[in-house]
Amino acid sequence: MELAILKQTGEDTGRKTLSEDVFALEPNDHAIYLDVKQYLANKRQGTHKSKERAEITGSTKKIKKQKGTGGARAGSIKSPIFRGGGRVFGPRPRDYSFKLNKKLKQVARKSALSYKAKENGLVICEDLVFDAPRTKEYIKLLANLSLSDKKTLLVVAENNKNLYLSARNLQKTKVRMVNELNTYELLDADRLVLCEGAVSKLETLLSK
């Protein structure tokens, strides 16, 4: 599979590249579902808590006699049926994270990349070098690639602090290194922009 590599100006360099083992795989929807589910579950704090009957501060005195009132029997003001009482089976702090095999997560990322390639959601450009943080330059780059109105995910091979700082204040764009990629962000972006160096590194990483 081949896709043109673009210059920062948006012009075609004449070079083409893409590995079919990574970008032309038959997508596995269930692997994608599990990987996205794990990503969202791991983001949950799990600090929710409500007080149950035993944790409410209040008298344990029987509030009315057992019989003869015409109403239901009641033992304590802390009963869940009364206002201010404890909650029945309330939430407790817990860890929502769960384990997934590395190979399954690898298949999920390959599947997400294959979907992007199939839906023309991939853009490959030359490696970017920013000498200083310049948001205007980054906006100009997106305009040259016809991505100004799209939610973009730019993937670089190595850490580029100036590039990251240039894009940090823009709402619809993110910059990630190859080893930081996850299936959720791949699918969440309208366009996936891969730097040329990131493509080869990504293919090596996902072909192991």
Image (tube, grey):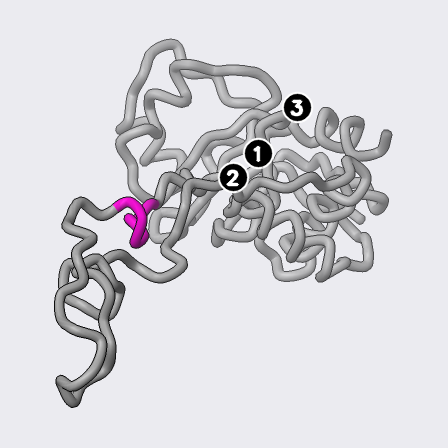
Residue most extreme to the bottom: 70
Q: Earlier in the sequence, mark 3 or mark 1?
A: 1
Circle 1 packing at 10 Å, graded few (<14), some (14-19), many (20+), is: many
Label 1 sits on a secondary structure element that is strand
Under mark 2, the amino acid is Asp
117 to 128, vertically: above or below: below
Q: Nearer the viewer, mark 3 or mark 1?
A: 3
Mark 3: which amino acid?
Gly
Which of the two discs, 2 and 3, sits closer to the camera?
2
**Quadrant in which the C terminus appears:** top right
| Residue at image location 55% in from the left, 32% down from the top | 155
Residue on which disc 1 sits: 125
Question: Looking at the image, is mark 2 or mark 1 earlier in the sequence?
Answer: 2
Q: Position of residue 89 (x, y in %)?
A: 40, 58
Residue assigned mark 2:
95
Report the front residue among 80 and 109. 80
Q: Nearer the viewer, mark 2 or mark 1?
A: 2
Q: Secondary structure at mark 3?
A: helix
Q: Which mark is residue 197?
A: 3
153 displayed left or right of 86: right
Label 2 element class? loop
Disc 2 to disc 1: CB gap under 8 Å: no
